[in-house]
Amino acid sequence: MYADIIIDITHEKLDKVFQYRVPEELEGDLRTGAGVIVPFGRGNRETKGYIVGFSETCDYDAEKIKNILRTDTSSVMIEARLVALAAWMKENYGGTMIQALKTVLPIKRTEQQKEQRILKRCISREAGEKKLEEYLHKNQKARARLMAALLDDEEVEYSLISQKLNITLTVVRALEEQGVLKIKNHKIYRNPVKEKEQQRHFITYTEEQERAIRTFENDYKKGIRKTYLLYGVTGSGKTEVYMEMIRQVVKEKRQAIVLIPEIALTYQTVMRFYRTFGERVSIMNSRLSAGERYDQMMRAKKGEIDVMIGPRSALFTPFPSLGLIVIDEEHEAAYKSEQVPRYHARETAIERASLEGASVVLGSATPSMEAFYRCELGEYTLLELKRRTAKAELPEVYTVDMREELQKGNRSILSDRLHELMEDRLKKKEQIILFLNRRGYAGFLSCRSCGYVVKCPHCDVSLATHNNGKMVCHYCGYEETVAKKCPSCGSPHIGGFRAGTQQIEELVKKEFPQARVLRMDLDTTRSKEGHEKILSAFANEEADILVGTQMIVKGHDFPNVTLVGVLAADMSLYSDDFRSAERTFELLTQAAGRAGRGKKKGEVVIQTYSPEHYSIQTAARQDYQAFYTEEMNYRELMGYPPAEHLMAVLVACEDEALLEKGMHYLKLYAMRITKNRKVQVIGPAAPAVGKVKDVYRKVLYLKQESYEILIEMKDKMEQYIELNRGFAKMRIQFDFDPMSGF
Ligand code: ADP
Ligand code: ZN
Ligand code: ZN
């Protein structure tokens, strides 16, 4: 028996695996992930290593292979637990142990440390307030935002300000010249907030918040560790609840991780955590260099912080005594990794929590089908916040049937209602967002007269039009020729929805020549600051109308926006993906939430060809429960997650013919091993994008109720792939319960 071992895993040598012999006396004791002591290097220095796999044969001269000395008794170490988590990830999501380890372990890279800029207010509070008034008076909104932040906290970190408040260096320099602030450089980031406890404002929790907090607290004190789902609309006080739970965990000398999607990690949110937990908080974001990330991780390991806030990767913060993992906006697709191992942060968090005796709190205004389903099964505990704490009213939502617009002779992209309301807002000098729902756009075909959408007869997902005149199912490969007439009503007005953000921008400019229009999409945000420039210009009210794709509906608050128009709400509905209704519901709910954030009440117009679809109706009513019930019926009927599990085998290859052949054999093999197990094998099919940079792609789906059986299938297929050299030129990945197309 031989073991593959990784030495000194916290450093850069991760890529290399060394083989050692397992001595007989240790044979029963060792598992993947276990820490061991081995002789290493020429001097045979006793070194710590981790087992990442076993084999019966050795790849080297058996004479030269050294023995493992003993198991490492100090393996209560944090790394050992993360290695065990990596082993679980490899098992549950596929890929190699090295790939899994690289995901969970902070790796030291020698790198120049970036300097951190701190902005310090150097005028008194009173003088600052005067300045603030002056900026507001002169309509210098960016300066006003910066001044307001400096009044809240005497010192703020520049990167946070620039990212989250959309403030440019020019603005900072201007205030510096006026003697309002000083720019200081810090080598190591220190949290600027000092008088933490004084700044905390005490609030009286609502009854609902109180109940959620007590439930958690009582369990926690009794040593019960669970997964909770905190379900409550935006503004219902979820963040306050998380912070109270964290406070209780920290009181017991344990630490907490808070996952927030990068796009929702707003300045305000981060500052709330800073004010509550002061120096003991750290944040992680994609702008940190690898070196900075490593430093943050080491601070956590040394016990210098109690709370880590960040996107998906912050889940692997090496805290010595983890007590709680919070996942805010748990429904976000960004929680699924698109790299091997293709892990989901929710499931992985639950596994990590169970390995380390911690609890998990998931939070959302539109919980994922998975999370709500687990609540129904009794696996998670549901905590609900039904009411908003603030006075902000929910917006008024109108649904417009675009088929009727066509009948009335209106062929424009804008319905009469939306047009009217836009005129009204322009007159009142309030702002408008036009949201073009292009998510998952795959060129589906729909009828503008009756709303009929051409679907796959086998999969109940829409067919995508291809350039060769065919409509294709991306799940099973079914195809037919493109229809010229609507198969349902015979109308010739059948086609794809082709308008892009650019056409909409042009149209709006033509119809409202006096309006100032900004556009935000992939084209206008390609440059590094493009994204922020547009958002800050809109926040500064330099434009009346913002036209954009889904990137504008998340996380940003524009208090002067009182009208949101959703164009082509159906677009995401008929993407070729079983989650399309769920995404539509989420997007519409979020888009609606953009209107009326300030004191004025907002209105939302949803334009659609399928007003009768449940995802649109329930979103317009903001009725999650009704949506869930309908959607779950569909998932159960079709056997899609969370009712059953779906494993995608994604294969990429430069040689198309070879790929075809490989898929053929892979499918035969899959059919053979699944024969007696009621596993459905679907495909091979071309994914939404069939070729990327001259590499062809195909996908095979396996469907089964039991995840364990799918894992078995994956293990067997991995072995089969490894044993057959024909697959050497193909890149093969597994994706469990996929969140998006390949
Ligand atoms: P969510 O995270 O659900 O969007 P937040 O926790 O951000 O909600 O709360 C929304 C706003 O209401 C915040 O400004 C917060 O400080 C405030 N708030 C929350 N709970 C209370 C409460 N019990 N009393 C007063 N204000 C509250
Ligand atoms: Zn029709
Ligand atoms: Zn199909």
Image: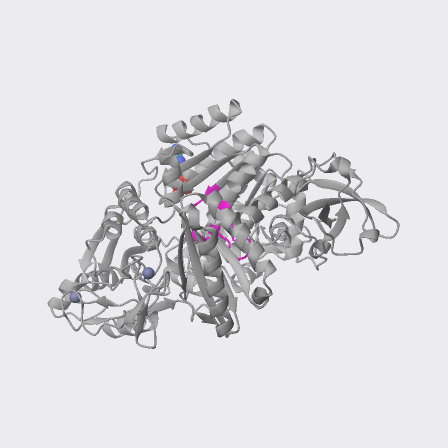
Is the C terminus in the top left, top right, bottom left or bottom right quadrant? bottom left
Estimate the x, y position of residue 650 in percent, counting from the top left.
Answer: 48, 61
Residue furthest left in the image: 408
Indicate left or right for 485 with 329 as reference: left
Look at the image and say whether residue 330 sits in the magenta stretch: yes
Estimate the x, y position of residue 191 in percent, counting from the top left.
Answer: 61, 45
Estimate the x, y position of residue 593 in percent, counting from the top left.
Answer: 32, 50
- The correct choice, above or below, for 557 with respect to 363 in the image is below
Indicate left or right for 365 with 179 as reference: left
Look at the image and say whether residue 479 sits in the magenta stretch: no
- The correct choice, above or below, for 542 with respect to 470 in the image is above
- Can residue 145 be seen in this snapshot? no
**Range shown magenta:** 327-346
- The correct choice, above or below, for 441 with respect to 335 in the image is below
Q: At 67% across and 49% down in the image, what residue appears?
A: 295
Residue furthest bottom in the image: 468
Q: Main secondary structure of the magenta part?
A: loop
Indicate left or right for 433 with 686 as reference: left
